[in-house]
Image (spheres, rainbow, N blue to C red):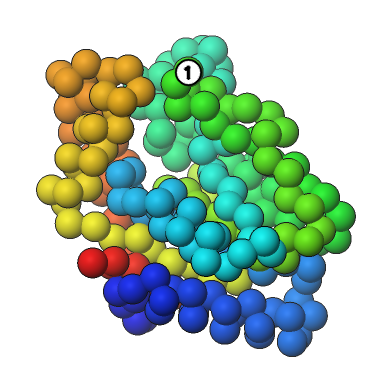
C-alpha cells in the first residue's frame, strides 16, 4: 500500500487504473472510491481530483443514500445519523452496479446538508463520464451489506488526516450548517467520532492512502 502525498500522485494512480480498465474492456466506466472518516476531506479531494481529470470525470457521494429523517426517527436512529445502518446500503450498491454495467445515462441522488436530506435524481452521469469518483465513509466496511460495495470499485483510496485538524474542520462544518458551537462539538466528539473509529479500522483494506500536505 503506497501513501500518496500530492494530488499529482493521486491523478497518476487513477489514470493508470483507468487505462487498465479500458484496455481490458472491463466495463463502460472506471469507479474510484474515496473512503475516510467524517471531516477527513473526502469531498475536497474528490472535487480536486475530478477537476484535474476533466470532463470525462464525475463525483458522486454516498451521502445521497442517507435514510430520510422521518425514517430514522421511526427506527430510533436519528441521534446517530451517519452510522452504517442509517444509510440505504442496498440502494447505494445498486447504483454502483448500474454505473459498472450501463452504457447510457445513470442518475444518482445528491444530499442537502442544510436540511440533512437526500435530493433524488440530483446527479446525472452521462455516457461520456467514463470515470466516476465515489466518496463515502463506508466504502470499505464489511458488515451490514456494505461488503458488496468494495468489489464494485476498480480502485480504493483512504483519505487520512491528522486527528486534531480533522476534528476542528468537522466542528466548523457543523456550525456552518446550523449547529451551535456546543452542539457541533458534541456531535463531532459523539456520533461522528464513534463512526470515525469504525472507519479507521478499514484503512488497511484500501489500495492506497492519501495524506496530502
Image coordinates for residue 148, horizontal then vertical, percent: 60, 56
Image coordinates for residue 205, horizontal then vertical, percent: 41, 68
Judging from the image, what secondary structure is the residue with disc 1 in? loop
Q: Which quarter of the rendering shows the C terminus?
A: bottom left
Q: Residue at x 41, y 76 (%)?
A: 8
Nearer the observer, 197 or 41: 41
> In the shown orientation, is residue 59 left or right of residue 39?
right
Q: Residues within 10 Å of mark 1 (few under 14, many from 20)?
A: few
Image coordinates for residue 44, horizontal then vertical, percent: 40, 51
Q: Which quarter of the rendering shows the N terminus?
A: bottom left
Could you tell me if residue 136 is visible in this image? yes
Nearer the observer, 194 or 60: 60
What residue is disc 1 on? Answer: 115
Could you tell me if residue 149 is visible in this image? no
User: Furthest residue to the right?
Assistant: 104
Nearer the observer, 143 or 48: 48
Height in image: 77 above or below 70? below
Which quadrant of the figure has residue 177? top left
Which quadrant of the figure has residue 128? bottom right
Q: Residue at x 23, y 41 (%)?
A: 169
Q: Residue at x 17, y 27 (%)?
A: 185
Image coordinates for residue 21, horizontal then vertical, percent: 69, 79
> In the shown orientation, is residue 168 left or right of residue 82?
left
Height in image: 155 above or below 136? below
Amino acid at each position: 500500500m503506497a501513501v500518496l502525498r500530492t494530488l499529482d500522485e493521486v491523478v497518476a494512480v487513477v489514470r493508470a487504473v483507468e487505462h487498465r480498465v479500458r484496455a481490458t474492456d472491463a466495463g463502460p466506466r472506471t469507479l474510484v472510491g474515496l473512503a475516510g472518516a467524517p471531516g477527513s476531506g473526502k469531498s475536497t479531494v474528490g472535487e480536486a481530483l475530478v477537476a484535474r481529470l476533466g470532463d470525462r470525470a464525475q463525483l458522486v457521494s454516498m451521502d445521497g443514500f442517507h435514510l430520510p429523517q422521518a425514517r430514522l426517527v421511526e427506527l430510533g436512529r436519528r441521534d446517530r445519523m451517519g452510522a452504517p445502518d442509517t444509510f440505504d446500503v442496498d440502494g447505494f450498491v445498486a447504483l454502483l452496479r448500474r454505473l459498472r454495467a450501463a452504457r447510457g445515462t445513470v442518475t444518482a441522488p445528491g444530499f442537502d446538508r442544510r436540511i440533512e436530506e437526500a435530493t433524488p435524481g440530483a446527479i446525472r452521469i452521462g455516457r461520456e463520464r467514463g470515470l466516476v469518483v465515489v466518496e463515502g465513509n463506508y466504502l470499505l466496511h464489511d458488515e451490514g451489506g456494505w461488503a458488496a460495495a468494495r468489489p464494485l470499485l476498480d480502485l480504493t483510496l483512504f483519505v487520512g488526516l491528522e486527528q486534531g485538524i480533522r476534528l476542528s474542520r468537522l466542528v466548523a462544518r457543523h456550525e456552518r450548517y446550523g449547529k451551535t458551537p456546543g452542539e457541533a462539538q458534541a456531535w463531532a466528539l459523539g456520533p461522528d467520532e464513534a463512526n470515525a473509529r469504525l472507519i479507521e479500522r478499514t484503512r488497511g483494506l484500501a489500495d492506497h492512502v492519501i495524506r496530502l500536505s
